[in-house]
Image: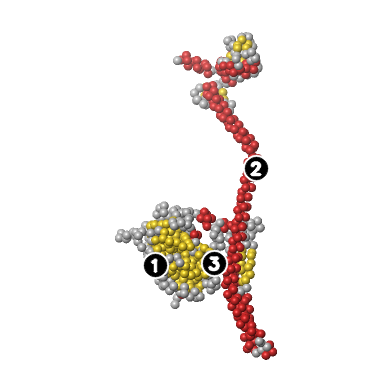
Amino acid sequence: MSSLSHGQQNNDDYQAVNRVFDTDSLFQCPLCRKNFQDPRILCSNGHTFCLYCVQHVLPDDGILKCPICKESHHFDSVSDIEQLQKNYTLQTLKRAEHHRIAPLGICQLCNKKPAYSRCFHCRSLACFKCMNEHEKNIVYEQTKEYTDLVRIRDKLNENISQWDKKLIESKHNIRKAIQVDTEKQIKEIEDREQALYAQLDDLYQNYSTAKNIKLQKIKIDIEKESKTLDQIDPKNWSISARIHSSQYWLNLQRKFDEQSIDFIYKSTSLSPINHSYLGEIHLKSSNEENQSLQQYKSSTFDNHLHLIPFDQLVGRQHIIKTEKDSKGLFNQSPKIHRKNENNNPAKQGENNEFTTRRMFRTSNRQELEDNTPLTPRMPIPPIHLEDYSKKATQILTGPNEADKFLAPKAIAITNTNQLIIADTRKHRIMIYDLNLKTMRGIEGFLFPDGLCLAKEQYIIITDRHRISKYDWFHGKMISFIGSKKEGCTRSSFSWPKGVAIDNNYVYACDSYNSRMIVLTHKMRYENEWLTMRGTKKLDPQYISISNGLLYVTAWQRIKPESCAYNAGCIIVYSTDGSAQRCIDTDSQSYLNLSVPEGIVCDSANQLILADRYTSKILSMNNDNQQSVMHFHGDKMKAPHYVCFSSDQNTMIVSDMGNNTVQFYGKKNP
């Protein structure tokens, strides 16, 4: 064992070898006179040459003689020369020559043996064995790094060669995108053009019908008094007759001037480089009509055709695609929240800004079954709008400052003074206790739009393309009809809105399908009919039922795919769907409706409805429609729905214009 250890130590000690041999001549190939590169033993005498040199001098016949001893060898091919034995001794001596230095200390790699050299790269002290491994590792890392650099170079060359091709491809793609967008803009402008033509025709038809009646009366008055005027002798004209005639004819002149109408088209490009919109059509009228146009510039579509952006011209389908879906109502039971009575509610997450409380349930209270008949509320007592103050006594903006309403629409109030609010774009139903001044929310809806009470704890809700029966007290859905997708079948709808109950049947306004739907109390299809005015379809909005008659507010769209509407009207139906009459607001100037929304009918057969674009609440007697009461609160911007407290002392209005719910109390006696 000591002999073997001594032999290993002698092999590592190259000082003696360096002193004995002339390494300069020892490490040179006899053929190329350069340092050996891959030394191979050619003959039996041990003469050594570079592998490359031997391959280079191999003659065509394959017989190679040793340049020193002339010993002959036969090789079939150049590759056979690679089978020659390597001269490991010479390689060892070559490495020894490379490390021919005196001991410098302890090897920094193994910390055991004496170090005879420093690494050329990292300058670490190492013994020969460690240096050998260390150099192999360095060669491996360098080879890897070199390979990576070669790969980067090749990749750069490839990218450079493909750069022009990608640039040209990108240019073609942009041209195609521009072409598609241009065609889309042209199509939308053409649609808008046709909409303007249709609106102009409707304006002409509506106003010509209404004004011809008044002009015909003026013509009759002219003919009536013309004979008297022709018989007047100016020389014998009395003062009284002169005053009478002057007043009469000047009055006729004034009446005629009031009927003068001009169509005006105004171009409304938003900027010199943005021509996304066509212009607007106005009716230029004199005196009070002109003043009304200025006062309600954005009110009726009879007086003003609104500017409609392109992204709304696609109509119903565009709205369905762009509206954001929320959690499905029927995937899980919605969460019930209640607000703290103080003004600093605890935050429960991004969509829950008020503290959660468990709803109190009495032990003897039973859950209502789905076969329980639906009972509408009793008709409200007669309403007198003139009794209410036009200054809002209270304004609700939401549960708290950080969680405000967004598009509050239908509202209803229970006999226990619980105000139920459809907060449409927040996808929830809010319940506000008028007595305790607290608010809680039921989340998990899609876009709740219309609602009506069915007994004390039931409500019927239209939610996007569904109609459902809901237990608001327990936060539980009972039954429903429809789905998330729109349709026009017995069990699919397109944005139903208003809903009402009569004789255990549910009547719903299937707005974008232009029809009325009748459902049973178990939410099963029963009947339907189209909403028409003459030969044109209307989009029903909201509904009220009284004494077996349905009062439906409706609009007429310019085109089926358009979002622009003509002035609205009120259609009266019997419960079997037969139309009784149409309160046509286009020709009834005394009513002056534009976009009627929520409607209520009291026990005196009086209609109270919210008119969004004129920012008013109106009431009129159903039997005597000439008497109309206009109510405009100081905070009203775009009222959507109206209801009254149980004691009739408060009128409550949902206003989409400023996302509030407003309270108007009666005037002090």
Q: Under tag 3, what secondary structure? A: loop
Q: How many C-alpha atoms fall within 10 Å of the one at disc 2: few (<14), some, or many (≥20)?
A: few
158 or 550: nearer the eye?
Answer: 550
Q: Residues within 10 Å of mark 1 (few under 14, many from 20)?
A: some
Q: Nearer the viewer, residue 465 or 418?
A: 465
* Residue picked out by circle 3: 567
Viewer-nearest of labels 3 and 1?
Answer: 3
Binning the other alpha carbons within 10 Å of mark 3 as few (below 14), some (14 to 19) or many (20 upward) gives many
Q: Quadrant of the N terminus?
A: top left
Mark 3 belongs to which amino acid?
Ala
Q: From the viewer's perspective, tell me whether residue 254 is left or right of residue 5.
A: right
Q: How is the image coloured?
A: secondary structure
Residue pointed to by mark 1 = 377
Q: Nearer the viewer, mark 3 or mark 2?
A: 3
Q: Quadrant of residue 468 in the image?
A: bottom left
Image location (x, y in percent) of residue 186: 62, 55
Residue in the picture at 41% in, 52% down: 331
